[in-house]
Image: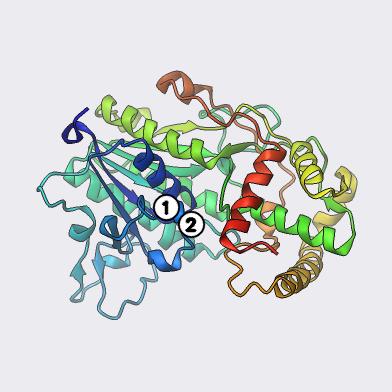
Amino acid sequence: MADAKKPAVLIVGGLGFIGRHLALYIHENNLASEVRLVDKVLPQLAWLAPEFEEACSKDKFVQADASREREWPDKSPPLKANSYLKPGSPTEHFPRIFDRANGEQFDYVINCGGETRHSQPDDVYEVRSYGLTVALGKEIARRGIPAFVETSTAHVYKGSSTPRKETDKLVPWHKLAAWKIKAADELRKIPNLQYCALRLPHVYGAYDPGYFATGICLSAVHVDLKQDLILLHTKDLKINTLHVKDAASALFEAAKWRAAQGFIDPKDGIVTFNVVDSNDTKQEDIANAFSEVFDLKVTFVGSLASQFAKLNLDDVLDDMNEVGLQTWAELVERANITRPGPISPFLERDILKDQDMCIDGSKFENETGWKPAYPKFGADSVREIVDSYKRMGWWP
């Protein structure tokens, strides 16, 4: 296929964990005629590994806050999601994000941005997640771009050991998920918007800075302390997973599918898909992987003890974080690591839920034909992550 017939792709949050892997997937498979990455963070501050150098090169990058239509002279962030509408003399910067040299529009806009940290105040999610999605949605609809796809979270569902389908009841686990739902509701009001959201479970892979980074760093801490790693809740707790390379390929397939569908009446609802691997991962699977890789005994406190811990969760977390962070700092110092990277054993309250993260991804696979290339989470998954940390000099 000639490049002229390949889609032009705009990736918002293009230097984030999923965004950079999406850029790499498109680059390695020569899938686009043009790729542009937009991010608030400069590439030199984004902890990019060498293999991302071409996919995330300077000529493809635009530094901008896509949650705002205008760039304010003092660079101060808005306090509310719609504060870009305040009076003043800002500089329009959506043209820098969206305009192409040939005068044509992008074919796909894929939003991997937004606030990914847990336990943040509502106004943080309102600006960085809700505000971002809504601002992008309005501009994409105005320009007539045929596909707007973004990452969402499977934490929007009520927890259950039975795989949740896209039509099941929404009961967000935390503020991050609640603002994702609010953003999707607001998008229904935007005329002619061709939108699709992928609800993802825990995403893992090389250079993971999130959920699995915490567990892996905690494992190293407990090896150093010569203590068992004790996990809250039971071994049967569902913690469904998806490899980051599969997340990247799914996002691109979703964009292709959405562009081909054309307009879908908002009365039929916003298009959403669950995407998950084939493992139906449980806490026991993760524990076994940690145990094999680190030669570490991993145990579970069980449901009754977990309920007691839940009543005192703030105290439990404070104690675990104090020990974990101090030991991690000592490990890093002993290894003479001066730039330890975006990983640590710090535990967020929002990730220690006693609810099952369990989703059914069959709808997306049936609609698009997509299948996970990494169907199972296991010890090799953990080794891949640790090896990536070693390559970057983050691992003690």
At horizontal 81% and vertical 68% (from top left) the residue drawn is 319
* Residue 122 seen in the current view: yes
Q: Quadrant of residue 171?
A: top right
Residue closest to the eye, 208 or 385: 385
Q: What numbered label is drawn on residue 52?
A: 1
Q: Is residue 130 above or below residue 335?
A: above
Name the image quarter holding the N terminus: top left
Q: What numbered label is drawn on residue 354?
A: none
Local SS, label 1: helix
Using residue 13 as the reference point, say whether residue 298 is left or right of it: right
- Distance, label 2 to label 1, CA atoms, is 6 Å
Most extreme residue toward the left is 103
Dot 1 amino acid type: Phe
Location of mark 2 (residue): 49
Dot 2 amino acid type: Ala
Residue closest to the eye, 248 or 381: 381
At horizontal 68% and vertical 45% (from top left) the residue drawn is 382
Residue closest to the eye, 303 or 258: 258
Residue 383: where, in percent of width, then height? 68, 45
At horizontal 45% and vertical 44% (from top left) the residue drawn is 151
Residue 281: where, in percent of width, then height? 69, 34
At horizontal 39% and vertical 55% (from top left) the residue drawn is 53
Local SS, label 2: loop
* Residue 312 seen in the current view: no
